[in-house]
Image (cartoon, rainbow, N blue to C red):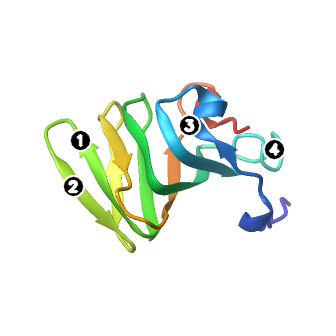
Amino acid sequence: MLAVIKRRTDEIEGHDVHDAYGTDARNVTIRWISDSRTGGPEYMHHFALRYFVIGPKGYMAAHKHPWEQEIIVTKGKALITLEKETREAVQGDVLYFAADELHGFRNETDSSFEFYCVIGCVGKGENCIGL
């Protein structure tokens, strides 16, 4: 029988998104809460969970990728750039982005914008390997 895996989010190291991935981003940190290595190969890995913090005046440029993702905003407010429009997201909002849907984030406030982000693992799950 497999055991429940328990971790504390505040004990997981954060990484600067620009430095880690070369992404057009400023003042953005990612923490990989779970990835395809969590618990070992005996666990099914169909998704990964990350936590993002976009600091004051920070942004992650519009981008797209071949996996779907869903975010749950836990703190703050930001503008979400889509293909043909911009929407505001605030604490408590849940947003779903389909695979290959253009999306970006811009925090124009003086406080952080924070969210959990669940992504589906595609292919052999290479996109679900954290840092």
The quarter of the displayed image where residue 61 is located: top left
- Quadrant holding the C terminus: top right
The tag earlier along the polypeptide, 1 or 4, is 4
Work out which quarter of the rendered image holds the N terminus and state it.
bottom right
Write the residue at 32% across / 40% down.
103
Disc nearer the start of the sequence (3/2):
2
Residue 77 horizontal side relative to residue 119, left or right: left
Distance, label 1 to label 4, CA atoms, is 37 Å
Please state the horizontal and vertical placement of residue 9, each as a whole percent of the image.
72, 65
N-terminal of the pair, mark 4 or mark 3, is: 4
Residue count near mark 3 (Cα–Cα under 10 Å), binned few <14, some 14–19, many ≥20: many
Tags 1 and 3 in contact by the CB under 8 Å rule?
no
| Residue that carries the numbered disc 2 in the rendered image | 87
| Position in image of residue 128 (x %, y %) | 63, 37
* Disc 2 + disc 4, Cβ < 8 Å: no
Label placed on residue 82: 1
**Element class at badge 3:** loop
How far apart are labels 2 and 1 at the CA level?
A: 8 Å
Label of residue 121 in the image: 3
- Marks 1 and 3, the one that precedes in the sequence: 1
**Marks 4 and 3, how far apart at CA:** 16 Å
